[in-house]
Image (spheres, helix red, strand yellow):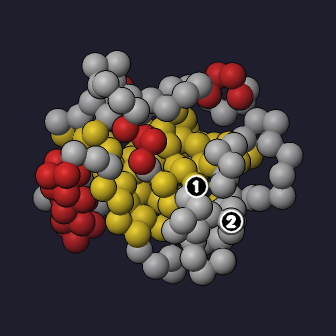
Amino acid sequence: GELTTELVSELVSYPDYSGSLAVEGTLTYADAGDGMTILTYNLSGVDTSCTSTTMCGVHIHVGTSCDVADDIGGHYYSSSLTSNPWSAVMFGDDTGTGDVAGVVCVSTGLSSSDISGRTVVIHDVDGAGVACGVIGGTTSSMSTSMAATHSTVAALTAAFGFAALAHFAAA
């Protein structure tokens, strides 16, 4: 089968970000069911200080707009969870190019109707917001092979009880 995904149509600089990074690329969200959230990213221009040992984050946040930092809010997950599932969702670029790609499956306890319209934030090595986008507005279907990858990541997450992360070489 195919999973329906929602795209982040545009990445913009995080409000009040004054650094030199200009993150571009694509992010998609899919609902894997049972409160499992799948976030796929293919980004360029991320902090090259983000390596496999000094990781950076890509997280869904509470807010619904990237216009004002205070409106973006914190990480978004169900209040029924006892800990923040986004804390373990990180990426690193050991190539030094600033290009990263990956798939994360996170047990957020939320459904697609909860997440559609929420913000996604890309963080630098210090945890500061660098780029922001809003989920939704555009949908597409994921290929069967990518859906299989998502299923594998979801199974790993369920088996090990933490956010599974799969990195792929950026094209």
The percent coordinates of residue 72 (x first, y second) are 61, 28
**Which residue is labeled 2 in the image?**
49
Q: Amino acid at mark 2?
A: Ser
Regarding residue 56, the answer to whether it shows in the image is yes
Which element is circle 1 on? strand
Q: Quadrant of residue 48?
A: bottom right
Taking the spot 59% from the left edge, 25% from the top edge, the residue there is 73
Residue 30 x %, y %: 32, 47
Would you say the residues marked 1 and 2 are in contact, meaning their CB atoms lie under 8 Å apart?
yes
Q: Residue 160: give x, y in percent of width and height.
A: 19, 52
| The N terminus - image quarter | bottom left
Residue labelled with disc 1: 56
161 or 144: which is nearer to us? 161
> Front-most of 112 and 140?
112
Q: Evaluate whether residue 138 shows in this view.
A: no
- Total marks drawn? 2
